Image (cartoon, grey):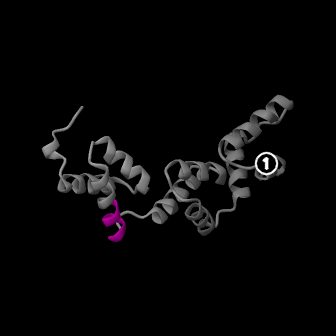
């Protein structure tokens, strides 16, 4: 769908960007991609994004902190959170800072994730153990966190 070029004004771009940000925070890359899909001029997009950053309506640091909290709530591990934030264009330094600020005990989160899924079910064979390891790895936990979750006795 090609939009009418007369409707692709800087004011329409600004209105569109604010509309997107009013629903939820976005990373700079994410917002730029969405505005490009709406066929706004790339130079106008960059100018608008700079202004949004300047006015603190667009902030990758805030976005990263919010995303970390949301992923922790979903019991996702640090590896998965890193991957998701990188995919959304957040700088690695910002990602590391957001993960450090959150102060989550990743070992206990892995254990909680494991126990919520497998509580009361014994590991009968190597296939079952491998399945559980894969589950925790897919949630973004590293091998040490997975080992801790598997080896800790349930409460």
Q: Quadrant of the N terminus?
A: top left
The x and y percentages for residue 22 are: 30, 57
Majority secondary structure of magenta residues: helix
The x and y percentages for residue 31 are: 37, 52
Residue placed under numbered mark 1 in the picture: 143
**Looking at the picture, does residue 72 appear above or below residue 119?**
below
Q: Is residue 34 magenta?
A: no
| In the image, farthest residue toward the left | 6
Relative side of 72 to 20, left or right: right
Relative side of 147 to 7, left or right: right
Q: Is residue 50 magenta?
A: yes
Q: Crowding at label 1, few (<14), some or many (≥20) Cα neighbours within 10 Å?
A: few
Q: Residue at x 74, y 50 (%)?
A: 142
* Range shown magenta: 49-55
Q: Residue at x 54, y 52 (%)?
A: 85
The x and y percentages for residue 117 are: 68, 40
Disc 1 element: helix
Q: Residue at x 38, y 63 (%)?
A: 58
Picture quadrant where residue 6 is located: top left
């Amino acid at each position: 769908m090609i939009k009418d070029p007369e409707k692709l004004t800087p004011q329409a771009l600004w209105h569109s960007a604010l509309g997107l940000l009013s629903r939820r925070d976005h990373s700079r890359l994410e917002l730029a991609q969405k505005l490009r899909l709406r066929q706004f001029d790339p130079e106008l997009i960059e100018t608008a994004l700079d202004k949004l950053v300047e006015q603190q309506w667009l902030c990758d640091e805030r976005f990263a902190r919010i995303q970390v909290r949301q992923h922790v709530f979903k019991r996702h591990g640090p590896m998965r959170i890193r991957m998701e934030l990188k995919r959304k264009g957040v700088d690695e330094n910002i990602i590391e800072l957001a993960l450090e600020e959150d102060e989550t005990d990743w070992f206990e989160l892995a254990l909680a994730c494991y126990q919520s899924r497998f509580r009361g079910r014994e590991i009968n064979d190597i296939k079952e153990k491998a399945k559980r390891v894969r589950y925790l790895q897919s949630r973004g936990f590293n091998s040490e966190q997975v080992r801790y979750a598997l080896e800790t006795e349930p409460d």
